[in-house]
Image: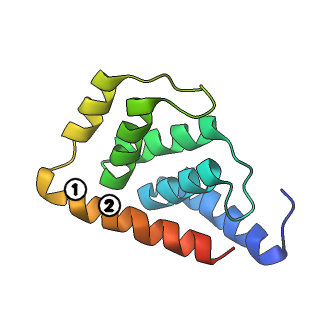
């Protein structure tokens, strides 16, 4: 990666937190890979893998992202559309928490984008 030292530290610690099992860090890392933020190159395969890992730890915003990707497939074709899998991931999220998940997603995206 080629970015300023502060971005290098951010990337280093975000990756370390994700590798240590922090589900929110996994989600943030996935967003960075999906959108090419904070010095990370766009990589839809890695993004989806981190979303899945975060969702496996019951982080509901990640489950919502996995469902979104399964609904239409990944832009680069690395994940095929699978409506049944999309529904399965959506069913993991309590209905009363859907709005909160979307708010969390927006806050994280706003924060990551504002740090560019």
Question: What residue is shown at x 67% (from left), y 41% (from top)?
Answer: 43
Determine contact: label 2, label 1, CB under 8 Å. Answer: yes
**Residue 71, located in which quarter of the rendered image?**
top left
**Whether residue 107 can be seen here:** yes
Question: Which residue, given by chain and number where applicable, does mark 1 sit on?
Answer: 98
Q: Secondary structure at mark 1?
A: helix
Question: What residue is shown at x 59% (from left), y 26% (from top)?
Answer: 78
Name the quadrant of the N terminus: bottom right
**Whether residue 20 can be seen here:** no
Please state if 12 lies on the left or on the right of 77 as rendered: right
**Residue 17, located in which quarter of the rendered image?**
bottom right
Question: Which residue, given by chain and number where applicable, does mark 2 sit on?
Answer: 102
**Residue 90, located in which quarter of the rendered image?**
top left
Question: What residue is shown at x 70% (from left), y 63% (from top)?
Answer: 12
Numbered circle sitting on residue 74: none
Q: CA distance from mark 2 to mark 1?
A: 6 Å
| Structure colour scheme | rainbow
- Of residue 26 and residue 39, the one placed in the foreground of this image is 39
- Residue 113: x and y in percent read 60, 70
Q: Residues within 10 Å of mark 1 (few under 14, many from 20)?
A: some
Above or below, 34 relative to 72:
below
Name the quadrant of the C terminus: bottom right
């Amino acid at each position: 990666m080629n970015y300023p030292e502060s971005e290098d530290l951010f990337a280093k610690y975000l990756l370390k937190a994700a590798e240590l099992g922090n589900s929110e860090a996994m989600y943030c890392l996935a967003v960075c890979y999906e959108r090419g933020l904070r010095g990370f190159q766009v990589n839809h395969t890695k993004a989806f893998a981190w979303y899945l890992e975060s969702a496996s730890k019951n982080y509901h915003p990640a489950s919502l992202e996995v469902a979104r990707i399964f609904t239409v497939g990944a832009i680069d074709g690395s994940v095929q559309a699978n409506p049944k899998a999309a529904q399965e991931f959506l069913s993991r999220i309590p209905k009363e928490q859907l709005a909160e998940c979307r708010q969390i997603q927006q806050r994280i995206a706003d924060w990551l984008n504002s740090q560019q």
